[in-house]
Amino acid sequence: MVLEYVVVLPDLLCRLVGQGIRPLLGIPCAKVTSCLTLVLLICFETVLLSTVSDCTKLIYVHWNTTNPMFRIDNTDHIIDVNKGNIPFEYDQVNIICPTYTPGTHEEDAEKYIIYNVSKEEYDSCRITNPNPRIIAICDKPYKLMYFTITFRSFTPQPGGLEFQPGQDYYFISTSSKEDLHRRIGGRCSSNNMKVVFKVCCRPEDTHAARVYEKHPNEVVKNEELTYSSGRQSVPSSCTVLLFYSTTIVLGLLVGL
């Protein structure tokens, strides 16, 4: 019975609208249906355009002292993630290690160990945890390296990174020019080498998220990358959906 109504409704709608506008436009019922479909798709695309900017982002963080995001006169090191994302879409960050051309003196090359720390350790630039969580090791200055983090709320991997909605996560590097493994001060104090990721809240069902997640949430080390400086967004499901809806609208316009 439900299926009959679903099938019959477009025909009834076509007849009702057609009786009202066919004398004015002189177009067949099929054309009226196409017009209605076109109007609905345009409305749908308008909604997508209003939300596409909130889809998943891929953020690039160049972890070196020349990056202006680490200056103390701005708040670029405080980064919002997962803001406005639909369920099961998560922002990512590529933490890019300093890279130098062959011939650069070893003492001039920046090297870092990046830690995930508590707020107290972040504020004091002092790592007190005897076994701190290491996010990245940038110790190959002549090779392009970056580390990808996905801000998922759950991972089946024991000890894996989890980023809970509404929580802040603190990354710092206390390495100095003389000591890569230093855990007090270092570039965290002298160059403000620290970042805060603020994970946005979402009223999503926690159980559904746990069932859906199949891949461990881990830091992925990569050694090749084509990128541009600054932050930028990459295509997500919203972008793909917008592309297909635009294609359909254009096709209907041509057919009218």
Image: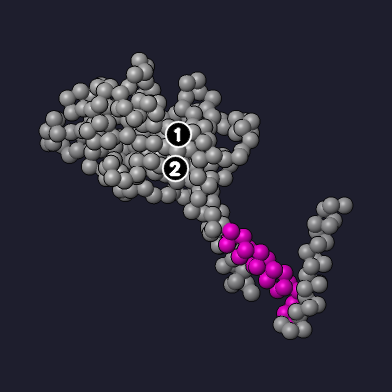
Query: Start and end of the magenta stretch?
Result: 26-47
The residue under the point 74% across, 84% down is 24
The residue under the point 58% across, 59% down is 47
Where is residue 11 drawn, in percent x and y?
80, 66
**Is residue 189 magenta-colored?**
no
The residue at which mark 1 appears reads as 168
Locate residue 189 relative to residue 20 in the image: left or right.
left
Outermost residue toward the top in this view: 130
Structural crowding at the residue carrying mark 1, measured as other residues with C-alpha within 10 Å and reported as few (<14), some (14–19) or many (≥20): some
Q: Disc 2 on helix, strand or loop?
A: strand
Q: Disc 1 on helix, strand or loop?
A: strand
Q: Is residue 177 above or below residue 250?
A: above
Where is residue 149 drawn, in percent x and y?
42, 34
Badge 2 amino acid: Asp
Which tag, 2 or 1, sits closer to the chain's start? Answer: 2
Structural crowding at the residue carrying mark 2, measured as other residues with C-alpha within 10 Å and reported as few (<14), some (14–19) or many (≥20): few
Q: Quadrant of residue 134?
A: top left
Coloration of the structure image: one colour
Q: Quadrant of residue 174?
A: top left
Q: Which mark is residue 252?
A: none
Q: Which secondary structure dominates the residues rendered in magenta?
A: helix
The residue under the point 54% across, 39% down is 201
Badge 1 amino acid: Asp
The residue at which mark 2 appears reads as 80
- Rounded to the nearest whole Å, what is the CA distance between mark 2 and mark 1? 9 Å
Q: How many numbered discs?
A: 2
The answer to which of 243 and 147 lies nearer the viewer is: 147
Quadrant including the C terminus? bottom right
**Residue 92 visible in the displayed image:** yes
